[in-house]
Image: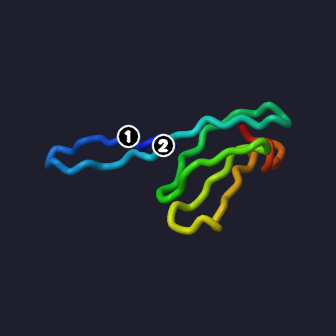
Amino acid sequence: MRKEFKIPKKDGKEIEKPEELRLVCRKCNHDWVETRPKGYCIRYNHKGNFLVNIKDKTDVRFFKCPKCGERKNIG
């Protein structure tokens, strides 16, 4: 799992920048960029990539292609 980029502020506190993901649909070959929501990590298997909640492992979110609507073949 990749770590989030941390940008130091002027007052010494660090803020977290959300990670941008470049995704591609294997069905229609459409590519797009999404940001990873806080509290989720990225997992992958032979069907595609998906998001898993760090605290609740049963909460799984699949990416959806904005062009064709495919959810499983996302790379």
Name the residue carrying label 2: 19
- In depth, the one of 1 and 16 nearer the eye is 1
Decide: few, some or many residues near mark 1? Use Cα within 10 Å; few <14, some 14-19, many ≥20.
few
Q: Position of residue 25 (x, y in %)?
A: 77, 37
Left/right of residue 43 with respect to residue 70 in the rendered view: left
Amino acid type at circle 2 is Glu
Q: Residue furthest left?
A: 11
Please give the name of the residue rendered at 39% of the width and 45% of the height, measured from the top-left corner: 17
Per the model, the C-alpha gap separating discs 1 and 2 is 7 Å
Please give the name of the residue rendered at 29% of the width and 41% of the height, measured from the top-left corner: 7
Q: Position of residue 71 (x, y in %)?
A: 78, 50
Amino acid type at circle 1 is Phe
Q: Position of residue 18 (x, y in %)?
A: 45, 46
Is label 1 in contact with label 2 (beta carbons under 8 Å)?
yes
Decide: few, some or many residues near mark 2? Use Cα within 10 Å; few <14, some 14-19, many ≥20.
some
Name the residue carrying label 1: 5
Q: Position of residue 59 (x, y in %)?
A: 63, 66
